[in-house]
């Protein structure tokens, strides 16, 4: 009952029902908006927390470095150390240096707040002293060759932080990396340089400053002013380099999203460490830090999925009911486009689509009637063309044939006259007894043989003919009297003007699922480069029936079929006919051979 009632509704009523079913869309939009807002709030809170944590960590590291810097200041003001350096500076070359006091180089260790460091001093004589284990490896080095030496010379009363791989070998035998605080030492009496202080902190000690604050879902890097990694803790398996270019960290602090592998997003925060102007960079897995908000998100997603299912159900139901007649009308149009004009659309409703379907059916009825009329007219037209062709050929042909028979009788050649008369009788019976448009290629070739035999009798020179047809296509259909006009042109305008040695070949074969018929003569021919046989007016008298043949082929089979004429003057002419291969049950009169 519901379907019957629904099928009688107008299109506007159906659209109204569809609109009612889609009222859930605002709810879906609201759910998406709430989900988006919730995620933005969660991300904003996570970002603030990450920035605060990175800033706090930068302050912790800054305080640790300040303590190390304080140790450097204590060495700078140590008068005992100044006196030692002055003594070394004033000693003559080769003179034994005073004994180094290890207590002197280790008495400020507690100033660095449990951070282990080693101390070395390079004197003005480029000699190194201190509590470093591999000082002998300094041989061959010169402090003036280091790029950073010029920098400390410009900031004599301030320490600088650097990384220098050439100095690492003085403090370790392994591939450990060190961070160095460099400061120039002065004689307080003259303010002249007396040496260069080097405090070395291993990367391991440096990492201890912050590693306890790095979570499992984070990777933390400390980079210097050139973007080189000073120390890092890599829990996300990024490697020993940051995944973002150094230009992203030019500001004092900030945050942004990184997506290096396009399948995982990281929240990146950075802050400048006081005293060194180095950057601490922290990468956090975004999904991990947003996980506390997942339950709320899952609730929203569940509501959205439920609303989506309801919306999908109503949409499919109403769309199917609404589009059913439209789809049927569309399928009907496709069938008509493919050539089936007998299709009709069933009308089961009373809406606007039903009216269109009725008009569509009426249109097809009209087209079918018009096509029937056109087919009948075309059939009558083709039959008239056949009759016109017969009328065109018969007077001229009969005149020559009767003249030939008269000559044979006068010359007492009764046998030739009898053969000619029998061939003419067979030809006339088959041509005039039936006006059907199509005959088999076998019948067409038999008609052609009789026609050529009669033409031979009218020629003064000998004519050798060769007519061949593949057995596979003998039962295929061809347009009636299609070959005779072309053969007549070959004989009348190509072979008769020739004095002797005339040859005519007609062959039919299958080629790429088509039938190809070749008619070749060795007559006088013409120059195909200078003239077009089909368009040049100088050949108008030679195109007897040729235009009729072309028109009949293309009207019956289409423009992709037709004839090709090629010729050479003094060599002969070749005509190639192409028609489709049509082989089906066909009833025709047997060729009358009596």
Image: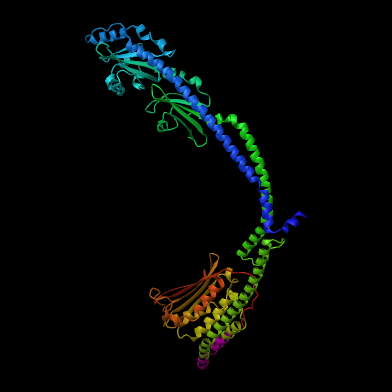
Residue in view at x 42 percent, y 80 percent: 537
**On the rendered structure, is 531 left or right of 473?**
left
Considering only vertical position in the picture, is 276 above or below 185? below
How many numbered marks appear?
0
Residue furthest toward the left?
92
| Residue 466, percent from left and from top | 50, 75
- Res 107 seen here: yes
Q: Nearer the viewer, residue 248 or 369?
A: 248
Residue furthest toward the bottom?
410
Picture quarter with the C terminus: bottom right
Prevalent SS, magenta region: helix
| Residue 481, percent from left and from top | 56, 79
Q: Is 278 inside the magenta-drawn segment?
A: no
Picture quarter with the N terminus: bottom right
Q: Is 413 inside the magenta-drawn segment?
A: yes
Q: How is the image coloured?
A: rainbow
- Res 234 seen here: no
Magenta range is 406-422
* Residue 352 quadrant: bottom right
* Residue 193 quadrant: top left
| Residue 58, percent from left and from top | 45, 23
Considering only vertical position in the picture, is 244 above or below 433? above
* Residue 376 quadrant: bottom right
Q: Nearer the viewer, residue 386 or 481?
A: 386
Q: Nearer the viewer, residue 218 or 254?
A: 254
| Residue 371, percent from left and from top | 62, 73
């Amino acid at each position: 009952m519901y379907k019957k009632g629904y099928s009688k509704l107008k299109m506007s009523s159906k659209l109204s029902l569809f609109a009612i079913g889609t009222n859930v869309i605002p709810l879906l939009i609201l759910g998406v908006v709430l989900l988006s807002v919730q995620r933005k709030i969660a991300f904003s809170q996570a970002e603030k927390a990450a920035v605060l944590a990175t800033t706090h960590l930068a302050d912790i590291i800054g305080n640790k470095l300040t303590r190390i810097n304080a140790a450097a200041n204590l060495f700078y003001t140590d008068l005992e150390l100044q006196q030692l350096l002055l003594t070394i500076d004033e000693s003559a070359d080769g003179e034994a240096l005073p004994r180094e006091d290890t207590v002197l180089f280790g008495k400020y260790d507690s100033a660095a707040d449990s951070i282990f460091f080693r101390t070395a001093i390079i004197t003005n004589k480029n000699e190194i002293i201190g509590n470093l284990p591999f000082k002998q490896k300094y041989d061959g080095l010169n402090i003036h060759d280091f790029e950073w030496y010029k920098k400390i010379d410009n900031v004599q009363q301030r320490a600088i932080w650097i990384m220098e791989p050439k100095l690492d070998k003085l403090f370790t035998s392994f591939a450990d990396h060190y961070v160095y605080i460099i400061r120039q030492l002065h004689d307080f009496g003259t303010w002249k340089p007396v040496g260069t202080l080097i405090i070395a902190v291993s990367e391991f000690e440096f990492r201890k400053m912050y590693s306890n604050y790095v979570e499992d879902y984070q990777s933390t890097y400390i980079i210097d002013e050139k973007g080189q990694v000073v120390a890092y803790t890599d829990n996300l398996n990024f490697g020993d380099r940051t995944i973002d270019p150094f230009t992203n960290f030019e500001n004092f602090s900030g945050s942004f999203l990184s997506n290096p592998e396009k399948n995982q997003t990281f929240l990146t925060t950075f802050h400048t460490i006081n005293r060194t102007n180095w950057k601490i960079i922290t990468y956090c897995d975004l999904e991990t830090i947003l996980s506390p908000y997942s339950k709320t998100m899952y609730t929203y997603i569940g509501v959205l999925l439920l609303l989506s299912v309801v919306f999908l159900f109503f949409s499919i139901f109403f769309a199917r009911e609404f589009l059913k007649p439209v789809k049927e009308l569309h399928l009907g149009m496709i069938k008509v486009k493919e050539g089936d004009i007998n299709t009709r659309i069933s009308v089961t409703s009373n809406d606007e689509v039903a009216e269109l379907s009725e008009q569509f059916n009426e249109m097809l009825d009209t087209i079918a009637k018009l096509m029937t009329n056109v087919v009948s007219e075309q059939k009558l037209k083709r039959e008239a063309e056949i009759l016109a062709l017969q009328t065109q050929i018969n007077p001229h042909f009969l005149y020559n044939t009767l003249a030939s028979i008269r000559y044979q009788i006068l010359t007492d050649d009764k046998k030739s006259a009898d053969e000619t008369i029998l061939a003419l009788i067979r030809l006339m019976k088959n041509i005039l007894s039936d006006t059907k448009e199509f005959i088999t290629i076998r019948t067409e070739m038999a008609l052609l043989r009789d026609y050529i035999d009669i033409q031979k009798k009218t020629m003064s020179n000998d004519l050798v003919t060769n007519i061949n047809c593949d057995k596979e296509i003998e039962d295929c259909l061809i347009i009636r009297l299609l070959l005779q006009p072309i053969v007549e042109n070959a004989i009348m305008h190509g072979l008769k003007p020739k004095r002797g040695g005339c040859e005519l070949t007609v062959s039919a074969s299958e080629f790429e699922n088509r039938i190809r018929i070749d008619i070749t003569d060795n007559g006088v021919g013409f120059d195909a480069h200078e003239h077009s046989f089909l368009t040049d007016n100088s050949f108008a008298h030679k195109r007897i029936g040729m235009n009729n043949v072309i028109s009949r082929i293309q009207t019956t089979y289409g423009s992709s079929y037709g004839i090709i004429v090629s010729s050479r003057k003094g060599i002969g002419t070749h005509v190639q006919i192409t028609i489709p291969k049509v082989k089906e049950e066909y009833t025709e009169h047997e060729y009358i051979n009596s």
